[in-house]
Image (cartoon, coloured by chain):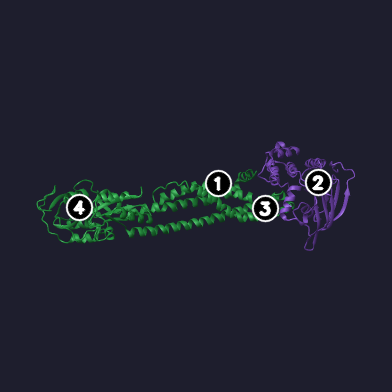
Chain colours: A purple, B green
Amino acid sequence: MSLLELHNVYKIYGDLHALDNVDLKVERGEWVAIMGPSGSGKSTMMNIIGCMDKPTKGEVLLDGIDIAKESAKNLTTIRRDKIGLIFQQFHLVNYLTALENVMLAQYYHSIPDEKEAYEALEKVGLADRAKHLPSQLSGGEQQRVCVARALINHPEIILADEPTGNLDDSNEETVVELFRRLHEDGTTLIVVTHDPEVAEVAQRMVVLRNGKIARETVNENFTGHIRFHV
Amino acid sequence: MFFRMITASLMRRRSRMLVALLAIAIGATILSGLVTIYYDVPRQMGAQFRNYGANILFTPSENSFSAEDLEAGLALADEGALVGSAPYRYESVRIHEQPVMAAGTNMEGAQKTSPYWLVEGEWPSASGEVMIGKNVADNLQLKNGSTFSMVYTGEDSEETPAESGAESAADGVESAAEEAESPAAGPSDGSGGEEDAEEDGYREAEFTVTAVLSTGGPEENYVYISMEDLEALTEISGKIDLAEVSMSAGAEELNAYTQKVSGEVPAVRAQLVKRVTASETTVLSKLQALVLLVTIVVLALTMICVATTMTAVVAERRREIGLRKAIGASDGSIIREFMGEGMLLGFLGGIIGAFLGFAFAQTVSMKVFSSSITFQPLLVPVTIIVSIAITGLACLLPIRSATKVDPALVLKGE
C-alpha cells in the first residue's frame, strides 16, 4: 500500500472546484514535486494532505487512514505524528530561540529533548546558531531551522510549501541538499513549488491546472542535486 | 518546556506584556488598597468617632458604684480597645452663695472621653484647681486665675445625673444642672484653704480656676474638680455616680462588652450611648458599602482591561497560534499556554499590586485619617490569588477565540 493515496478527490467552494476528481499516489520514501500556476489547487491539496482540511468528496488515505472520515481532534494527532511541515515564510515563533523552536514540535509530539533538538540543528548546520532568535538569523538559516523542526519527530512525510520561495540561490541549494539527505534517509517528501529548478530535482513532478492533474513526469535522471538553468 | 515557553513569551515580548502587566498591576493595586481601607475603616473611623465623646456609660444598679467596680468593668475590655474612661460624682455645692453642681472626675480620663471639649486655660492638674463651665463663669463672674470658696453642706440633690438616665447624662446631665439652680441654704464663712467642719456636714475649701469649659451644651453648668478634692471636701470616698467609657470597637463588640460588664459586675449597669454608636454604625456601614462598590467596579474594569489586552494579544498572535496548531498543538495545549501566560501575568501583577496597594492605602489613610495603617500579610496571598483568578476569567473569551484559529492560514501565507 502507498503511503499516500488520493482517490476521486474533490474540494468544492460554491461553484469553484478547487480540486476536481484528483487521483494521486505517493510511495513511501518517494520525492514528489507539485507544480502549477496560482489558483491551480496546490494549496488546497497541501491543506488536505496536511490534515488541515477535508475533501468535499473522495478518499484520502494517509498510511492507511482515511483522513476524510477523521474528527478534527484526530486530524491534529495524525498531523503531529505523521507529518512535518515546512513553509515558504518559515513561521518560526519569534520569541523562541532556534533550539526552542525545534523543541516546540517535540513538546506537542511527546517530550522535549534538548540534546536531540540540538542534534537536529547540527544536521542542518546550525549548531552554532541554536541560541539565536529568528530575528538574528538569515532567511536561509530560518528555513533550515524550519527543516530541523519538521524532521525532529521523524515524520512519515514532509510537506514543503514553496520552501525556497524566499531564498537566494545559495540558500536554495542548501535547502535542496537537505531534502536530498532526508530522501536518502528514506523520508517521503512532497514539495510544492513554482521553481522548475527545485521541481526538477524531485523523482516525480505533478503539474496541477484548474484543480486537475494536468501532467505527471518521472525524472529519469534523478540525482537529488539541483542544476541551475543559466 | 511549558514554563520555558510562557516565560520566554513574557520576557522576550516585554513591550506588549508590560501593557497587560500594567493593567493587572493597577487593578490589583487599587483592589488591594481598597480592601485594606475597607478593613481598616472601622478602626480609623472608630478612632475619629471617639473624638465625639464616650460611647458607653456605666451607671449604678442602685445608688452608686465604687472605683473597684469601675476597674472591674474596665478590665473586661479587649486589650487595646479602651480609649479612655472618666468616673463622675456629682454633688451640690455653693459658690458665692449660689447653688452649683460640682462634678468630681479624673481629669486625664475626662480629656480622653471628651476630646471635643473646648477648654480655655489649662486642665486642672493639682489639688485645689478647678475647671468651670462657661455658664457658671458668667453667672459667678469667675475667670481663669480667680479663687473662690466652695461650700459643701451635705444637702442631697433631688436627682443626680445618674438617676436622670444614661442618655441625658451623656448629653451633659441637664437635669442635674437644673437641679443645681434651685436655691440651697447654707452658710459660708468665706474661709478658704482647708475644709472646715464647723457644723455637721458643712465643709468649705478654696479653689482656683485654671480653665473655662465651653461645649455649647449642659457641661457649661458644672464645676469640674478632681475626684480626690471632691472626696476630701465631702469626706465621702469611693462613690461614683456614673462613668463615661470610650471604646474603639464595632457595634457588636460594644454590645457584647456592655452585656458582659452588666453580667459580671452587679453594681454596674453598662449601656451604649445609642446616639453615638448608632450614627457610627450607620456611617461605617455606608462607607464600607461605598468602598465595596468601588472595589467591585475596579474589579470589573480590571477584567475588561485585561480581556481587551489579551484579545489584542491573541489577535496579533493568530499566525503563531495557527503555526502551533499546524505542528500538532491541540486546543487544550493552546488554552494551557495562553492561560499560563495570563496567570503568570496575574501572579506578577498581584505581587506588584499587593505592595503598591498597601502604599496606596497608607497614603489615603494618612491624607484622610492622619494615621497609619498596619500591614496585613494575609492580604498579599489574597491579592495574588484574586489577581490570578480575575486574569484567568478575563482570558477565557480571548483564549476561546484562539482555539478557533484555522491552522491552514499559515500555509496561505497570512
Q: Residues within 10 Å of mark 2 (few under 14, many from 20)?
A: many
Give the image location of residue A113, x and y in percent.
69, 40
- For this orientation, the residue located farthest to the right is A220
In this rendered view, identify the residue nearer to me: B211 or A229: B211
Q: Which mark is residue A140?
A: none
Is residue A100 at all visible to an observer of this figure? yes
Element type where label 1 sits in the image: helix
Q: Mark 2 — residue?
A: A189
Kind of residue at disc 2: Leu
Q: Mark 3 — residue?
A: B331
In this rendered view, identify the residue nearer to me: B110 or A90: B110
Instruction: State which tag comes first along the sequence, 3 or 4.
Output: 4
Q: Mark 1 — residue?
A: B348
Give the image location of residue B136, x and y in percent.
20, 57
Which callout, 3 or 4, points to the residue nearer the camera? 3
Q: Residues within 10 Å of mark 1 (few under 14, many from 20)?
A: some
The span from disc 3 to disc 4 (Cα, nearest Å) is 88 Å
Q: Residues within 10 Å of mark 4 (few under 14, many from 20)?
A: many
